[in-house]
Image (cartoon, grey):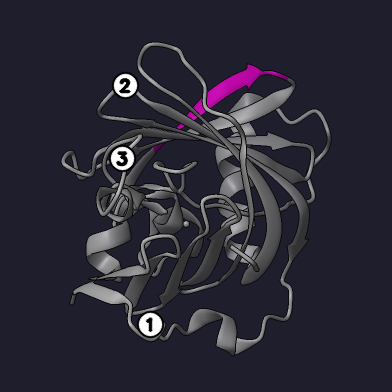
Amino acid sequence: MKMMDVGLNQIQATGPQRLRASLCVCLRSSAVRFFAIFTLLLPVSVPAQNAIDQFRMFVQSTKSARADFSQVVTDNRGKASAPSRGSLEFERPGKFRWVYEKPAQTIVGDGKKVWFFDQDLNQVSVRSIEAAFSSTPAALLAGKAEIDAAFTLVAGGESDSLNWVNAEPKQKDAGIEKIRLGFQGADLQVMELADAFGNKTRITLSKLERNARIDAKQFTFKAPKGADVVGE
């Protein structure tokens, strides 16, 4: 997937800070990055109280997936960015590839480490997967640990024709205040992330293929020649 930052910290970062910002939000446009995917076989009209069960069933039944996405970041003053587009792939546990078209950025996880590559800067940032995604959407959807160990799940009711699940990280210094997962019928359609700075990221999925056969090479990364490599 020409591809969750998903990652962990602020928004609208520039230069080398863009990669660090990626580490704070499991994907954003130009600055906030974050991650997601999914599908289930439930009736179109799913009661809000069943949304959590729907999400758990999705996680249990989805071992891999690929999808396209569109992402919009709204800052704490209500100003929305232009849509950022790309593609993603994941394979549980802990493997994923998330690609942004503009600016050209790629996030790859091999189950142990995560690489954030900014093509314009020719810079690579490397972190352990636990440090990068312990309380992010990546952990929710492609992680190793049990969901309840890292998140508190609450039914979020119905809005925008979607049934919502709210996931609140138990790790309070994660940089993310809340993740919302919006289901329509059998599909996870939308992910919304609110960070500690008042910014909101909305990721809309399309062309979702659940339990896709994905080439293992998609989950490996080799730093380009001459790239500045920072981190572990």
How many marks do you count on the picture? 3
First along the sequence among labels 2 and 3: 3
Asked whether the viewer can see residue 94, the reply is no
First along the sequence among labels 1 and 3: 3
Percent position (x, y) of residue 205? Answer: 69, 45
Q: Nearer the viewer, mark 2 or mark 3?
A: 3
Q: Is residue 157 magenta?
A: yes
CB contact under 8 Å: marks 2 and 1: no
Q: Identify the secondary structure beneath mark 2.
A: loop
Farthest residue to the right: give it.
Answer: 44
Mark 1 surroundings within 10 Å by alpha-carbon count, few (fewer than 14), some (14 through 19), many (20 or more):
some
Mark 3 surroundings within 10 Å by alpha-carbon count, few (fewer than 14), some (14 through 19), many (20 or more):
some
Percent position (x, y) of residue 51? Answer: 61, 35
Left or right of 101: which side holds 26?
Answer: left
Mark 2 surroundings within 10 Å by alpha-carbon count, few (fewer than 14), some (14 through 19), many (20 or more):
some
Report, in whole angstroms, how far the alpha carbon at label 2 lies from the one at label 3. Answer: 15 Å
Report, in whole angstroms, how far the alpha carbon at label 2 lies from the one at label 1. Answer: 33 Å
Percent position (x, y) of residue 74? Answer: 46, 23
Percent position (x, y) of residue 5? Answer: 42, 54
- Give the numbered dot on residue 13: 3
What residue is drawn where x is 32% and y is 49%?
18
Specify the segment rendered in magenta: 153-160
CB contact under 8 Å: marks 1 and 3: no
Q: Amino acid at mark 1?
A: Ala
- Give the numbered dot on residue 198: 2
What residue is drawn where x is 18% and y is 77%?
232
